[in-house]
Image (tube, rainbow, N blue to C red):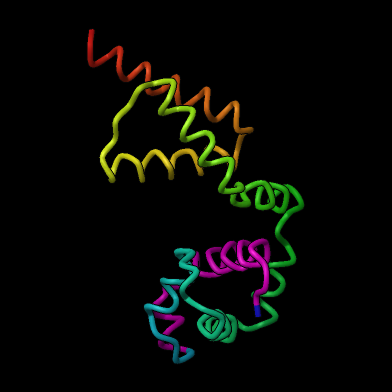
């Protein structure tokens, strides 16, 4: 039913809009969907799967959900496209540069958090801007600890 990340984002926006006036329990009870399915979709869990999305769309009424999807503004489409995942190579390069510049030694949890932070920043900025921003955050944090 939903093939691309952009369509999925539109679907989630429509689902959230639809559920503003109805509870997940009400939708589930009325249309025979599991409440967990509704929560998975509205909370943007990709593992909700196509069949779950289909059930939700049926519960909302295809025409209703379609009209909400079509009503997503062009500005929203632009921001959705900008949030595409950055290339892994860029993430790794920025990650290595930050570790080299700051001299940080991180445990597994710290490495994962830094990697995720870089990934989020790269969806919004260029690699250089993300690297600069994160390095700046680390140096400010380091200065606070010392002083």
State the residue lying farthest toward the bottom: 32
Q: Is residue 17 left or right of residue 102?
A: right
Relative depth, front residue between 74 and 109 = 109
Q: Is residue 9 left or right of residue 49?
A: right
Relative depth, front residue between 137 and 39 = 137
Residue 122 position, x and y percent, is 57, 39
Main secondary structure found in the magenta portion: helix
Residue 97 position, x and y percent, is 49, 28
Q: Is residue 51 left or right of residue 6?
A: left
Residue 91 within the magenta-colored segment of the rendering: no
Relative depth, front residue between 54 and 128 = 128
Tell me which residue sits at (50%, 69%) in the image: 46
Residue 38 position, x and y percent, is 44, 76
Image quarter of the N terminus: bottom right
Range covered by the magenta-colored residues: 2-30
Relative depth, front residue between 109 and 56 = 109
Tell me which residue sits at (29%, 35%) in the image: 106
Residue 96 position, x and y percent, is 46, 33
């Amino acid at each position: 039913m939903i093939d691309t990340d952009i369509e999925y984002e539109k679907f989630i926006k429509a689902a959230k809009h639809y559920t503003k006036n109805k509870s997940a329990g009400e939708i589930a009870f009325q249309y025979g969907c599991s409440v967990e399915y509704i929560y998975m979709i509205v909370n943007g869990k990709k593992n909700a799967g196509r069949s779950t999305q289909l059930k939700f769309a049926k519960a909302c009424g295809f025409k209703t959900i379609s009209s909400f999807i079509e009503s997503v503004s062009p500005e929203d489409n632009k921001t959705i496209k900008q949030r595409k995942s950055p290339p892994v190579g860029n993430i790794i390069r920025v990650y290595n540069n930050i570790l080299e510049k700051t001299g940080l030694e991180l445990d597994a949890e710290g490495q994962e958090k830094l990697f995720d932070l870089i990934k989020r920043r790269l969806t919004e900025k260029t690699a250089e801007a993300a690297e600069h921003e994160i390095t700046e955050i680390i140096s400010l944090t380091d200065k606070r600890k010392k002083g």
